[in-house]
Amino acid sequence: MEPETDPFLIPRDPGEERANEVVREFLIRASPPAAIFRQGGSDGGYALVVPRMRGERLLTVPGVNEADFHFHGNSGTTSARLADFIAGAVQESGADHLKLPLLTNPQASLLAAQLSERLPEWRLSTALSAVCPTAAGVATEPGILRKAILRAEREGLLVEASSTFPAEEIIALHRQRWGNNRGDSFFGMLQALLSGGLAELVTARTRDGRLAAAQLDILGTKTRHCYYVAADIEQASGGGTAVLGIQWRRFLLSSSAVYSFGRGSERYKYQFATSCRELFEIRGFYAPRPLLEEG
């Protein structure tokens, strides 16, 4: 395949790539996998892992459920070299299940076809796995967000950017809102992104200093990603919208051209979105044909 037509050779956003590397390496250190395979060898780079889990032996990417963007393969890797690496990791790991998320449709279709050639005993398919609302070509602040900021000020909420990550408070707020569905490593990853200058955090606090809402955006070079949000919707119902409003203002003042609302189909995101990215995944299962024919 010619380089100009290979969807894996599209130039990468350097800001996103740095953030992607921080997420990958932090999660590998925080939750060491049962097995790890590096395209760059021991020097690091793109990784596939077998997480510590029971049952089927899954081969996937680190933090498979934690990212809103993911680069497959080291920079400059063609689809053919990437397929060679993945197929080799499948064979070496003894995996019986493969999951590769967050691909564009052209990437997923091409890579699945190339893996099918290399893994004839596997059943592979691609599917739409998530949608990501985005806003581009905007230069103004939506009225809903402006009103939310004014309302927060009237109600005594202090909404401002924070250079520190109040981990204990954010964990408590998250568990109050969403339950205990995130481990400490996830919040450690958020802190690593913020301390590395790869993210910005906006918080809303009540008059007595209690954390009412928090939003962390990952800073790509061209795209700003609304990555994590938590809010106390009972005690400060407008806090979450107010912190989004401040992040939107910071987006307008930045060099980013696109605001991404992250994976998910929550209806509020489409009040501000102008388009939507589709994200695909490859799923594969070991199922040798002779065994199926015998059955």
Image (tube, rainbow, N blue to C red):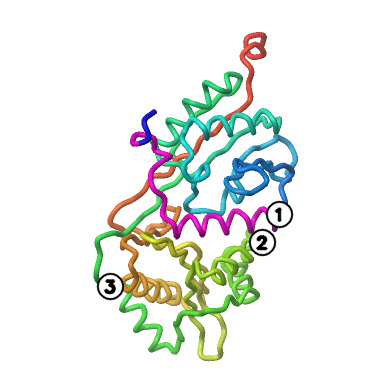
Residue 180 x, y percent position in the rendering: 65, 62
Front position in the image: 148 or 23 = 23
Give above or below for 165 relative to 156.
above
On the image, numbered disc 1 is attached to which residue?
Answer: 31
Report the Cα–Cα distance between label 1 and label 2. 8 Å
Q: Residue at x 28, y 56 (%)?
A: 274
Of helix, strand and loop, which one carries label 1?
Answer: loop
Amino acid carrying label 2: it is Ser
On the image, numbered disc 3 is attached to which residue?
Answer: 141
Of helix, strand and loop, which one carries label 3?
Answer: loop
Report the Cα–Cα distance between label 1 and label 3. 40 Å
Q: Is residue 269 left or right of residue 98?
A: left
Chain-order first, disc 1 or disc 3? 1
Q: Residue at x 51, y 83 (%)?
A: 205
On the image, numbered disc 2 is attached to which residue?
Answer: 185
Front position in the image: 180 or 124 = 124
Give above or below for 197 relative to 65.
below
Which quarter of the image is occupied by the C terminus? Answer: top right
Amino acid carrying label 1: it is Ser
Front position in the image: 205 or 186 = 186
Residue 93 x, y percent position in the rendering: 70, 33
Residue 185 x, y percent position in the rendering: 66, 61
Number of numbered callouts drawn:
3
Which SS does the magenta portion mostly show?
helix
Front position in the image: 1 or 162 = 1
Q: Is label 1 in contact with label 2 (beta carbons under 8 Å)?
A: yes
| Segment colored magenta | 4-29
Chain-order first, disc 1 or disc 2? 1
